[in-house]
Amino acid sequence: MLAFLQFAVILDFMLMSPLGAIIMPALAIGPKQFGLVVSAYAFSAGLSGLLTAGFADRFDRKKLLLFFYVGFILGTLWCGLAQSFETLLMARVVTGLFGGVIGSVVMAISTDLFPVQMRGRVMGMIQTAFAASQVMGIPIGLYLSNRWNWHVPFLAMAGLGVFGGLFVAWRMEPVAAHLNIPQEHSPWMHLFHTVTEPRYLLGFAITAFLTTGGYMLMPFSSAFTVNNIGISLHDLPTVYLVTGLCTIFVGPLVGKAADAFGKFRVFILGTALSITMVLIYTHLGQTPLPLLIVVNTVMFVGIFSRMIPFQAMMSTVPSTTQRGSFNAINASVQQLSGGLASVISGHIVTLGADGKLQNFDITGYVVVGSSLTSLLLLWLLQRSVAAKPAAQVTPAV
């Protein structure tokens, strides 16, 4: 059920990337405006996370999850009904206000319910939602948009989300054990103590640098694939389909490897692989479809091999009574930094007279720099966590 909720939230973001090649000409907007549409979700999600962080540990996590999920579905419906750049922008703002908190609540629930020895596998299973959005959501979304228009995928996702939300409301048990632990009286002091803990601040910084990578590349990946690499819109679903199938298989294996061999070691390998493949991908010219599929698949394997152990390590950082606020702020940092990266990418990438994207390789260099920085900071964090007494925090590796 947690994986399904992640699937819905991730698909909402993932859809914007492949549909970019369709939305931009349909609404007569350029890369800068499209980057703003993508970042609008991120900025509003970041604001929402900050506003809810002080209260995130004061409610049954299931009820909190369903409240924001209902708002997310309504925002997605509005995206499907939008007819102009302005209305789509507003719809993305509303969707972000609600959707940006869901991932943090999912993380808090998974940390509450599963011991640290299993969290690599747990995060691996939850993150298969990312791959599933590629296998089922993106190809279907592209098919629906090619068959009718770009509005239909959002309407279909809203309809699917209603049934998923009803199932979660019916079958998921309350998650309220944290309410039995004494908490601070003031939610604002709860928030203050969360944002001033040095170990937490280091974790937030790592999240910011890691997020830069995805938001720098993904908003323009479909336009780059079509206009620069020479893949047709009809072949684009195949790229996402094969990549998604491979990552669905790899995700759980990465989680098991993180539990067995050490989460930080797996993170290092994932960082090295993702850096190599990002540099190759952002320098591609006219490329045959099979070769592009191989490059894209290996790149996402590297990204997953970094994302899964990182989330498992981050789950060990906050104390039980601060999990909700920590994850809400962490999600907020993720969205805000991602929104900023999307805006920056929109200013770096330009549309040439021949219709090709220019300076896309520069975004690749930025991603490499942020990846190396996050690796250094995570090394410092895991040393800090391991040095804490067991009564305060469970070692991350």
Image: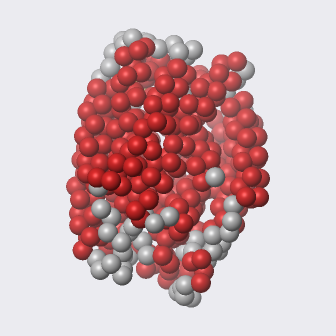
Residue 369 shown left or right of residue 221 in the figure: left
Asked if residue 324 can be seen in this view, the reply is yes
Which residue is at a point 26% across and 33% down the rendered structure image?
276
Asked if residue 34 can be seen in this view, the reply is no
Q: Indicate the position of residue 75 as horizontal and vertical percent values.
A: 70, 47
The residue lying furthest to the front in this view is 260
Q: Indicate the position of residue 314 as horizontal and vertical percent values.
A: 39, 62
Q: Indicate the position of residue 346 as horizontal and vertical percent values.
A: 43, 36
- In this view, the residue in front, 193 or 90, is 193
Residue 37 shown left or right of residue 330 in the figure: right
Which residue is at a point 34% across and 38% down the rendered structure image?
302
- In this view, the residue in front, 108 or 377, is 108
Task: Identify the image quadrant of the C terminus.
Answer: bottom left
Which residue is at a point 70% across and 18% down the rendered structure image?
147
Which residue is at a point 60% across and 54% down the rendered structure image?
2
Considering only vertical position in the picture, is 307 above or below 218? below
Q: Indicate the position of residue 143 as horizontal and vertical percent values.
A: 65, 21
- In this view, the residue in front, 265 or 223, is 265
**Total label count?**
0
Residue 327 shown left or right of residue 362 in the figure: right
Q: Which quadrant of the view contains residue 144?
A: top right
Q: What is the image's colouring?
A: secondary structure
Q: Which quadrant of the view contains residue 85?
A: top right
